[in-house]
Image (cartoon, coloured by chain):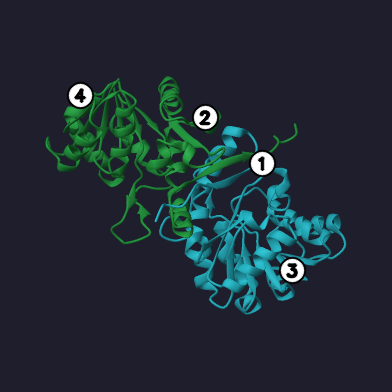
Chain colours: A green, B cyan
Amino acid sequence: MRIAVLGTGTVGETIGSKLVALGHEVKMGSRSPDNPKARAWVAKAGGGASQGTFADAARFGEIAFNCTAGTASIEALEAAGRENLAGKILIDLANPLEFSAGMPPSLSIVNTDSLGEQIQRVFPETKVVKTLNTVNATVMVNPGLVPGDHDLFVSGNDSAAKAQVIDILTGWYGWKRENVIDLGDISTARGTEMLLPLWLRLMFAFGNPHFNFHVVRGPGRPA
Amino acid sequence: MRIAVLGTGTVGETIGSKLVALGHEVKMGSRSPDNPKARAWVAKAGGGASQGTFADAARFGEIAFNCTAGTASIEALEAAGRENLAGKILIDLANPLEFSAGMPPSLSIVNTDSLGEQIQRVFPETKVVKTLNTVNATVMVNPGLVPGDHDLFVSGNDSAAKAQVIDILTGWYGWKRENVIDLGDISTARGTEMLLPLWLRLMFAFGNPHFNFHVVRGPGRPA
């Protein structure tokens, strides 16, 4: 499949390299057509890896991954071009982390709105599916790094798009189907983006990002 | 032990009944000295159960549980009296859920502050420990309702107070020591209060509140 990876950070590199290793053609998009980080990634990933502008990548991809920094996502996606993303699935991995006031970051969009919803509003013809934003990049593409059962959350308005994304998570990345929880429409992205403050405190407490949440269920309420 | 339970809702009733069953003397505090819900609870709980105003309860208790609605907590604690809570541990179970705009609720305090921090600022002589706010009341006092390992988070500025609270969680309520995660100072309450939007969406998805989060850890980052 032809895939756009928007963003040249650790998440974009990790997601992109895994996709190339799986045999896909991946174009990494950034602000400039010859971004040094993207160039280094292409050299390292080899095979089906290429780079270009956000618009080049979005035009190329049959689906797209938003791996940009959350506070820059809307601008990056505008640069990618509404028409190049129309009708396509956009897997939104970004979190609206605001680092300007130091550590720990706060959220630039929070509580009564979310980045996932903002993107869906600005790009109504794109099928936005929020997922993978609650785990470290290394865990995203290698869930076995964390032992046993642990979960991913999926939010989106389009059921068929969510089903396709769940196939990608399970078939390409090795997540167990029973460990992928469909929370509902894109407004449920508020919940997963707001998990980041706890995630960050746990990372500080543990000293590493190799952990994940498992939702353990008890019996249903008696009728 | 003499214990104050502030609040007459489901959380206060459940927490209080468990404490009475364990042989403690528990005074449930509310706005009025003869609250009908508190009176019904005293009749049902029997034994060491009693009721009174917020101030009566705070004066009575060697420790206190804040089981009031989060949006009313500061006012209730002011009524309980700064002097009656001074030097004591206040276990803060409340979440600042704002229901005025309908379901799902938003948070009235969020992101760069938390209810736990607000309470600690307003009552500097009280040792505020935030915990239990991420599980349903029935799970708080009966962790075995959810099978296997699942976790509680503890936030607070006073290490000795946190240690005492962890003893209460394990000794009285049956939480396993290895399932209690000390996140750090009271500012980490931001993380656990901000877990509520995800918690609520999961409750809607599952149709019942009998679940909890387990943080599953992988290997540390290689040195």
Q: Residues within 10 Å of mark 3 (few under 14, many from 20)?
A: many
Q: Quadrant of residue B205?
A: top right
Disc 2 with disc 3 on a shared chain: no
Quadrant in the picture for the C terminus of chain B: bottom left
- Host chain of mark 4: A
Which structural element holds mark 4? helix
Q: Secondary structure at mark 1?
A: loop
- Asked whether the residues under the numbered discs 2 and 1 touch, taking CB atoms below 8 Å apart as contact, a structural biologist would say no
Q: List x then y, in percent, for residue B40.
A: 81, 55
Label for residue B210?
1
Q: CA distance from mark 1 to mark 3?
A: 27 Å
Q: Residue at x 40, y 44 (%)?
A: A136
- For the residues labelled 4 and 3, the Cα–Cα distance comes to 65 Å
Image quarter where the N terminus of chain B lies is: bottom right
Closer to the camera in the image, A161 or A199: A199
Q: Are marks 2 and 4 on the same chain?
A: yes
Q: Quadrant of residue B155?
A: bottom right
Q: Chain of mark 3?
A: B
Name the side, left or right, on which B70 lies relative to A106: right
Labels 1, 3: front one: 1
Name the outermost residue toward the front.
B223
Element under disc 2: loop
**Amino acid under disc 4:** Arg
Q: Which residue is mark 3?
A: B3
Q: Are marks 4 and 1 in contact (CB under 8 Å)?
A: no
What amino acid type is highlighted by mark number 3? Ile
Residue occupied by mark 2 = A176
Mark found first going from the N terminus, 1 or 3? 3
